[in-house]
Image (cartoon, rainbow, N blue to C red):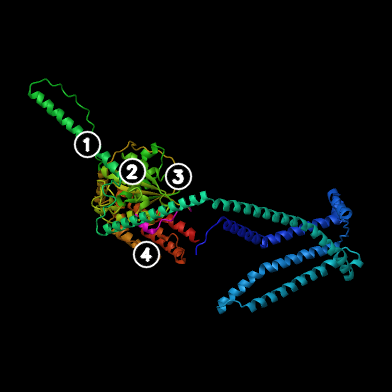
């Protein structure tokens, strides 16, 4: 049976809810407690007015209090002697009230805990008899506790009051209680109750007025609803509502049929891909158009030159005078760098840095260039302000290219934060700046392309860069980063291969890493795949006498120099030197259970020849690789055997390589030893 919401029923519901809320508020413990606190406070104030012998009144000579006392004694004929015993009795009442309130307040919680405990033990709630027994025992104990508390206060407080001896006996206390204290408190509370009573009367009057108004409104509404105009309007409204309902039902049926047809079409392979015919990579398409225009312009210029030369030759054959073409200044291409020039490359680049007020140690410069020869990813780590972002930027300026910087965000969690994602709403791929520059590098194969991820460890590297780290394990022909799954009829940019972006061989990735508490720790998985360079010291100014002019360098030339460095036997590790280092690695594995694989050994064999060709020594290169690749794995380990093992390692290095040769390793050993101390 359906119910109709008439105005009268709505008013009744509202009135009922209001009364229920009012009752709930009035019977709540907080309101009950607050009312009695106010009553006790006002009672204490009025008793203070009646207590004419109170020393505070005499001290302040309060005319206002005296006037209230005169009103009580003169007008109301209330003249009770408020003594010390009156105050004691009053505060005993207060204590009893708070004790009773506290008893009621905690009783329910204690009963609930007792019932929950029985449910856990026996699996059944308390019975009615158990609840009655609990209440009786609880109130008996509470009563005994309150009686004992009052008796204790009387026994301790009354004998020590500054009262005459006659007033300290029980008969005087009882007489004072009956003749003075109880009437005083009763009359005071009666006066105090006038205020809430007045408020209650006003509240009832307000409710009566609201009820009368609601009756009037209900009567008017009823008369309006019974009129012919209202009935006709309601009939028209109901008819319109019925039409709308039928239209909605029809539309729902049509949409259901359309959805069913769409599902059938999808099952039968008849649905066309929503991406078909769209350029879903707008930024990459613009890059394609940019280089198409560049190529078209070059082709037009070449065609124009060829046509001009053909017209000139035809004019000469016809015997016409042809003006001589002025000789154009030939711009010489920079000569390719030789191996001998490359051996001075680190010194000249350091001089270039000095003249721009940047000061870097040769070891860092050699490690950076040798790192490019041994890995596609380099980590520059250290404190902020030590030149981690400056080095790659100025290096690219020196060789005639440009580095691109991308600040890593703390919210990066997967590859889509680096390369972008497909938006179903916009029906296009949201390319990042990183992807744009990675894609454009394919059009400039002669330029060295560095993509710098600034503050790389502000998020976990193995989360958002894992795909790139894994890709570099494969041959360069397989350096493809997946972007999106596509169909054959989707329009794709020229340089994308099946929805995947190729990492060009002219591209390296540089990560700057700040070592502080606000960043994540770089894991061994990342360190094994990259070349880490530490920026530990302040950049102290110095001078260099080497040439400091920029040295344009193509990517092919740089790769050729790396290969030539590896081809010189004096740069490579000999069989004896390699065996000696492998023994050091075996000693470290036996002592600390720290091992490494072929990947790190391949990096060492590519790193050492370039480092040595740039003016370093094999021992320096091995020291850097041993400290950063192997010994670094001891960070975060605090087993007792490590400290003794570090002592053994120091002795081994001093015996096999000599003291002060592996400086980086010795410094790291001292640092780990301090942490273990």
Q: Earlier in the sequence, mark 1 or mark 2?
A: 1
Question: Mark 2 and mark 3 in contact (Cβ < 8 Å)?
Answer: no
Q: 58 or 651: nearer the eye?
A: 58
Question: Mark 4 and mark 3 in contact (Cβ < 8 Å)?
Answer: no
Gap in Å between the C-alphas at discs 1 and 3? 45 Å
Gap in Å between the C-alphas at discs 3 and 2? 22 Å
Residue 402 image position (x, y, % from top left): 33, 41
Q: Earlier in the sequence, mark 1 or mark 3?
A: 1
Q: 405 or 170: nearer the eye?
A: 170
Residue 101 image position (x, y, % from top left): 71, 66
Looking at the rendered structure, the secondary structure element under dot 4 is helix
Looking at the rendered structure, the secondary structure element under dot 2 is helix
What residue is shown with label 2? 346
Q: Say left or right for 297 vs 157.
A: left
Q: Mark 3: few, some, or many residues within 10 Å (few <14, many ≥20)? A: few
Residue at coordinates 44% horizontally, 64% vertically from top-left? Answer: 642
In the image, the segment drawn in magenta is 517-529
Question: Mark 2 and mark 1 in contact (Cβ < 8 Å)?
Answer: no
Mark 1 or 2, closer to the camera: 1
Which label was assigned to residue 385?
Answer: 3
């Amino acid at each position: 049976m359906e119910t109709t919401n008439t105005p009268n029923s709505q008013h009744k519901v509202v009135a009922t809810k209001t009364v229920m809320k009012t009752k709930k508020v009035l019977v709540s413990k907080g309101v009950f407690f607050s009312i009695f606190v106010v009553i006790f406070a006002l009672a204490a104030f009025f008793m203070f007015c009646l207590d004419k012998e109170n020393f505070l009144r005499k001290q302040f000579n309060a005319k206002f209090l005296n006037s209230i006392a005169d009103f009580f004694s003169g007008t109301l004929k209330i003249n009770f002697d408020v003594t010390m015993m009156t105050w004691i009795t009053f505060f005993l009442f207060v204590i009893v009230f708070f004790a009773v309130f506290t008893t009621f307040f905690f009783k329910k919680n204690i009963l609930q805990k007792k019932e929950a405990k029985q449910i856990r033990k026996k699996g059944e709630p308390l019975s009615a008899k158990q609840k009655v027994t609990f209440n009786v025992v609880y109130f008996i104990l509470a009563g005994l506790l309150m009686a004992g508390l009052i008796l204790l206060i009387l026994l301790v407080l009354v004998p020590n009051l500054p009262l005459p001896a006659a007033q300290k006996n029980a008969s005087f206390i009882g007489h004072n209680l009956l003749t003075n204290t109880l009437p005083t408190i009763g009359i005071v509370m009666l006066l105090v109750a006038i205020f809430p009573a007045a408020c209650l009367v006003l509240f009832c009057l307000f409710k009566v007025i609201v009820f009368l108004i609601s009756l009037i409104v209900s009567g008017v509404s009823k008369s309006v609803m019974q009129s012919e105009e209202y009935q006709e309007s309601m009939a028209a409204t109901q008819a319109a509502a019925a039409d709308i309902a039928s239209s909605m039902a029809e539309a729902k049926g049509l949409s259901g049929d359309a959805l069913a047809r769409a599902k059938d079409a999808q099952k039968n392979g008849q649905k066309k891909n929503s991406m078909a015919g769209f350029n879903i990579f707008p930024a990459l398409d613009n890059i394609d158009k940019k280089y198409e225009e560049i190529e078209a312009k070059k082709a037009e210029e070449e065609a124009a030159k060829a046509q001009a030369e053909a017209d000139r030759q035809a004019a000469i054959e016809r015997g016409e005078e042809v003006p001589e073409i002025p000789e154009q200044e030939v711009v010489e291409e920079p000569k390719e760098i030789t191996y001998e020039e490359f051996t001075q490359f680190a010194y000249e680049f350091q001089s270039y840095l000095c003249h721009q007020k940047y000061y870097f140690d040769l070891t860092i410069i050699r490690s950076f260039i040798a790192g490019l020869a041994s890995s596609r990813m380099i980590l520059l780590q250290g404190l902020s302000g030590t030149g981690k972002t400056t080095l790659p930027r100025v290096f690219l300026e020196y060789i005639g290219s440009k580095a691109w910087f991308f600040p890593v965000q703390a919210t990066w969690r997967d590859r889509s934060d680096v390369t972008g994602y497909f938006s179903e709403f916009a029906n296009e791929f949201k390319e990042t700046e990183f992807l744009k520059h990675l894609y454009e590098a394919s059009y400039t194969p002669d330029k060295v392309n560095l993509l710098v991820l600034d503050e790389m460890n502000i998020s976990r590297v193995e989360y958002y860069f894992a795909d790139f780290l894994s890709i570099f394990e494969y041959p360069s022909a397989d350096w493809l980063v997946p972007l999106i799954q596509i169909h054959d009829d989707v329009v794709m940019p020229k340089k994308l291969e099946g929805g995947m972006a190729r990492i060009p061989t002219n591209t390296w990735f540089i990560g700057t890493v700040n070592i502080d508490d606000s960043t994540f720790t770089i894991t061994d998985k990342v360190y094994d795949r990259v070349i880490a360079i530490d920026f530990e010291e302040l950049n102290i100014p110095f001078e260099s006498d080497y040439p400091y002019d920029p040295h344009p360098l193509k990517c092919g030339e740089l790769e050729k120099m790396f290969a030539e460095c590896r081809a010189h036997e004096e740069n490579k590790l000999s069989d004896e030197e390699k065996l000696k280092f492998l023994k050091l690695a075996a000693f470290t594995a036996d002592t600390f259970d720290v091992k490494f694989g072929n990947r790190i050994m391949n990096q060492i064999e590519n790193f050492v020849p370039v480092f040595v060709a740039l003016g370093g020594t094999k021992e320096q290169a091995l020291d850097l690789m041993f400290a950063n690749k192997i010994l670094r794995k001891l960070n975060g380990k605090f087993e007792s055997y490590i400290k003794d093992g570090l002592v053994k390692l120091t002795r081994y290095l001093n015996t096999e390589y000599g003291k002060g040769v592996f400086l980086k390793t010795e410094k790291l050993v001292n640092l780990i030893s301090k942490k273990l101390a």
